Image (cartoon, helix red, strand yellow):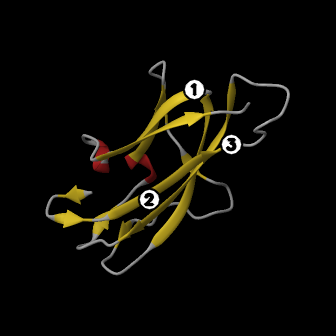
Amino acid sequence: MQLAGAEMLMNVIGPDVPGEGLPKVTETTTCTWTITLSGATAPIPLSVGDFSSRDHLGTTYRPTPVIGHPGPPARILPGQQVTFELRAIMRTGEGLMTFAPGGKLPVAAWDFVVEND
């Protein structure tokens, strides 16, 4: 991913959902993403508000840090690697996680499927 003269690697895993394989399928479930940032070529500011997800019906969700775990740092520095978790309760089905620094246009996106069956 490139940001105004800087580059950074982002690895997004998830969403991890509780209860996969249970006999009762719910319309919504808790989704947790693990995000690892590394390889920054310059200091890059970060905020939890830079991340959002959207379901297949167009509803936007604002993930928050997992309670008891640190959220993203205020910035990532060259040579630094950080990992944090974000969580949202989402409708099951297809989704898209985006990273839009400063609330501007997304510079990275990851598609996923929320399954709890």
- Say which amino acid is labelled 2: Asn
Residue 30 picture location, percent across and down = 67, 39
Structural distance between the alpha carbons of marks 2 and 3: 18 Å
Residue 71 picture location, percent across and down = 53, 60
Q: Secondary structure at mark 3?
A: loop
Look at 32% across and 73% down and name the residue there: 39
Quadrant of res 44: bottom left
**Mark 1 or mark 3: whose residue is earlier in sequence:** 3
Q: Going by the image, does 17 lie left or right of 55? A: right
Q: Secondary structure at mark 2?
A: strand
Question: Up-down: is 103 above or below 117?
Answer: below
Residue marked by disc 1: 93
Residue marked by disc 2: 11
Q: Name the foreground residue: 114 vs 63.
A: 114
Look at 67% across and 27% down and name the residue there: 28
Residue 62 picture location, percent across and down = 50, 39
Q: Going by the image, does 25 lie left or right of 58? A: right
- In the rendering, which numbered label is found on residue 3? none
**Mark 2 or mark 3: whose residue is earlier in sequence:** 2
Question: Up-down: is 80 above or below 9?
Answer: below
Q: Going by the image, does 52 lie left or right of 108? A: right
Q: Going by the image, does 108 lie left or right of 84? A: left
Circles 2 and 3, Cβ within 8 Å, touching? The answer is no
Look at 46% across and 36% down and name the residue there: 53
Label 1 Cα crowd, 10 Å radius (few <14 / some 14-19 / many 20+): some
Structural distance between the alpha carbons of marks 1 and 3: 12 Å
Label 3 Cα crowd, 10 Å radius (few <14 / some 14-19 / many 20+): some
- In the rendering, which numbered label is found on residue 17? 3
Q: Secondary structure at mark 1?
A: strand
- Say which amino acid is labelled 1: Gly
**Mark 2 or mark 1: whose residue is earlier in sequence:** 2
- Say which amino acid is labelled 3: Val
